[in-house]
Image: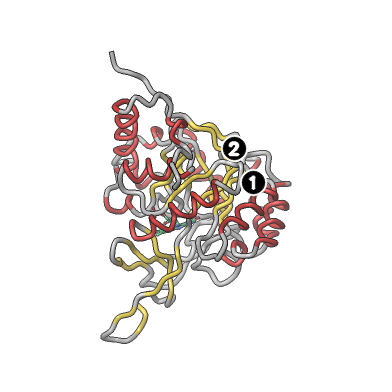
């Protein structure tokens, strides 16, 4: 008889069938992956970052591979929140997948307006990105000051009946105080980390490789930073954490769970293997069975600190 394990988790009121989600900006609106896998089996999809109006994003080149990772300066290219609601969300809901809408704005008012629009739709939760390093206005500027994080979270909260997950930037000195502000402002969960600000130079031309000069570093290179931050935030807040940053194996997932993530997100690894998220889900289930762990939640925060 095959043993059964519980994989379902609760992210601040958002109940998902398993803890594997796909990270915003690395999974489009799901359609791109449909030929590779049954997307409805994912815990949730975090869709590409949405803005109030459509955005073309930054000039190219805007991605470059680095040692154990990549830099991107895509700059939130997207068709706008209304297009998403009319054309992409119905498709995803028909597929039966849990949808977390990721939002970015140039002002607090824009975040509020998008929340008002999305709260009336069938999307399941909102992930508020206050951590994009690739836009001139807003983005990471909102996520690096604890008072601004408190203010924006409080205001956006008023427009939402759906769970609000705040996505934090690793480009800060004290991640704990930022997370505490998000919790105080009414966040139901925290996502971390977004990308780390980085740069790469072409020594022949002596120019930055990215047209934007700088970009966000992601992939295995950032994992130790992400693990450290999830661990720190877990000790500072009581709301659940979705951990991400460089996950590419089941061992990585277990690491994130042990330091306190209740769920995880797969990002850059999707570009190397588009099926990886569901492969890791299978491996996670196998790991739990083999180690006689009946419920994935039993692993959360179980690190034994010295
Ligand atoms: C090409 C690219 C685009 C991204 N776009 C977004 C975005 O629109 N919104 C967002 O919140 N995060 C965005 N991210 C950040 C990822 O969601 C994730 O937080 C980060 O890449 C760390 O995870 P990873 O190392 O597994 O990729 C993007 C990352 C990449 C690589």
- Bin the neighbour count of mark 1 within 10 Å (Cα to Cα): few under 14, some 14-19, many 20 and up: many
Q: Nearer the N terminus, badge 1 or badge 2? A: 2
> Mark 2 vs ligand 1: CB under 8 Å?
no
Q: Residue at x 43, y 31 (%)?
A: 296
Which mark, by number, is residue 12? 2
Q: Residue at x 62, y 57 (%)?
A: 177
Residue 274 location (% of width, % of height):
30, 47
Q: Tags 1 and 2 in contact by the CB under 8 Å rule?
A: yes
Secondary element at tag 2: loop
Alpha carbon separation for disc pair 1 and 2: 8 Å
The answer to whether 226 appears left or right of 137 in the picture is left
Viewer-closest of 150 and 293: 293
The mark tally for this picture is 2
Q: Residue at x 29, y 35 (%)?
A: 283
Furthest-top residue in view?
1
Furthest-front residue in view?
306
Pointer 1 residue? 187
Secondary element at tag 1: loop
């Amino acid at each position: 008889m095959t043993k059964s394990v519980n994989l379902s988790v609760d992210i601040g009121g958002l109940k998902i069938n398993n803890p594997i989600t796909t990270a915003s900006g690395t999974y489009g609106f799901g359609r791109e992956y449909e030929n590779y896998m049954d997307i409805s089996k994912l815990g949730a999809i975090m869709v590409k970052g949405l803005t109030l109006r459509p955005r073309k994003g930054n000039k190219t080149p805007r991605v470059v591979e680095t040692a154990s990772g990549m830099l991107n300066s895509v700059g939130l290219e997207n068709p706008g929140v209304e297009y998403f609601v009319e054309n992409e969300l119905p498709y995803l809901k028909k597929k039966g997948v849990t949808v977390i809408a990721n939002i970015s704005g140039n002002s607090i008012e824009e975040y509020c307006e998008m929340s008002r629009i999305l709260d009336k739709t069938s999307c399941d939760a909102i992930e508020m990105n206050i951590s994009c390093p690739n836009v001139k206005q807003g983005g990471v500027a909102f996520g690096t000051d604890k008072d601004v994080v408190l203010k924006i979270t409080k205001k956006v909260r008023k427009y939402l009946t759906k769970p609000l997950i705040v996505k934090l930037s690793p480009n800060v000195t004290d991640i704990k105080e930022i997370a505490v502000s998000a919790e105080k402002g009414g966040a139901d969960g925290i996502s971390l980390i977004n990308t780390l600000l980085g740069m790469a130079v072409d020594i022949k031309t002596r120019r930055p490789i990215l047209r934007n000069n700088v970009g966000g570093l992601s992939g295995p290179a950032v994992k130790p930073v992400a693990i450290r931050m999830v661990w720190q935030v877990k000790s500072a807040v009581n709301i659940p954490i979705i951990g991400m940053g460089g996950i590419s194996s089941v061992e990585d997932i277990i690491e994130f769970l042990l330091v306190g993530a209740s769920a995880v997100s797969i990002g850059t690894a999707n570009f190397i293997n588009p099926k990886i998220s569901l492969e890791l889900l299978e491996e996670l289930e196998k790991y739990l069975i083999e180690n006689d762990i009946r419920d994935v939640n039993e692993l959360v925060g179980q690190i034994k600190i010295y």
